[in-house]
Image (cartoon, helix red, strand yellow):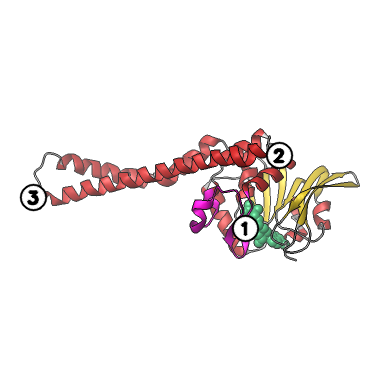
Amino acid sequence: MKTATISSNLHYQYCSVRNRIWVEKHIHNLLRAVGTPYNMDNAGKYIHLFLLLFFFLLQGKAALMAQDFERLRNDMVERQLKNRDIRSKVVLDAMRTVPRHLFVPQDMLRYAYQDSPLPIGLEQTISQPYMVAFMTEQLKPVRGMKILEIGTGSGYQAAILAYIGCEVYTIELLGELAQRAEKVIRELRFSNVYIRNGNGYAGWPDEAPFDAIIVTAAPDKIPQALIEQLKDGGKMIVPVGPVHDVQSLKLITKKGTKITTEDLMFVRFVPMIE
Ligand code: SAH
């Protein structure tokens, strides 16, 4: 999906066809009201005028908010990602474009672009922007790659991969989160994301093998089924370690029957539930 499509989708939210018809009707009434002295007979026309002004105020506010979020997103990319050596152009572009604020609950809106994970309800979190960018970059994503994600959560990580043009298959254990993520993904018109409610330990055998697998909850050991569903030459990134303790973010590469594991950094993710 291109930048232009996303911003026009956002614009679509603020200015639907219904709104336009409504505005045209009120402009018509406004033109009739202008130049008419105020009295009880034409009070209705003045009400139209006030409604119209109110509508434009709301539209203006929505446009300003969209601009604010865009500025916050650019700052996030400069300070949190480029300063910490995220270099991949496709990853930086995706992070600069995908509206992270649509993936956080209403009461977290003001923190959407801050340098931390945020609660999304049901004791789960949307990962820190840097962690999303870092894990995505490690997979070297390109258009058309088939990727499995375990732990859909808010759907943000899936949207970043989808924006890059990957085919994203994502599994979420909690039905309520899967439904919410589905709604935002559809609103943004991504057609290359498939969300399933289920347990990620089994992977998605019907769609295997995958070019890459990204696990965004921490199992205490690498799930064997996921290794089996990786293509020859494929990569998997997964935080491995005990529940509610520090885990090690591992990059696993499969070459024939040979599996190599690299420890990238210490991290803290919510547990991958059995
Ligand atoms: N990638 C998400 C963040 C994930 S938080 C985002 O971008 O917002 C981890 C998610 O993994 C949680 O939503 C949790 O419910 C889910 N999860 C935990 N155990 C799981 C399992 N066994 N299978 C699938 N999802 C699981």
- Residue 39: numbered disc: 3
- What is the quadrant of the N terminus in the image? top right
Relative placement, left or right, of 208 versus 28 is right
Q: Are marks 1 and 2 in contact (CB under 8 Å)?
A: no
| Cα gap from disc 3 to disc 1, whole angstroms | 58 Å
Which amino acid type is marked by label 2? Pro
| Cα gap from disc 1 to disc 2, whole angstroms | 23 Å
- Residue 141: numbered disc: 2
- Pointer 3 or 1: first along the chain: 3
Q: Quadrant of residue 32?
A: top left
Q: Nearer the viewer, residue 76 or 137?
A: 76
Q: Quadrant of ligand 1?
A: bottom right
Residue 195 in view, yes or no:
no
The residue that mark 1 highlights is 125
- Pointer 1 or 2: first along the chain: 1
28 part of magenta stretch = no
Residue 25: x and y in percent read 25, 44
Magenta stretch in the rendered image: 101-128
109 part of magenta stretch = yes
**10 Å neighbourhood of mark 3: few (<14), some, or many (≥20)?**
few
| Cα gap from disc 2 to disc 3, whole angstroms | 66 Å
**10 Å neighbourhood of mark 1: few (<14), some, or many (≥20)?**
some
- What is the quadrant of the C terminus in the image? bottom right
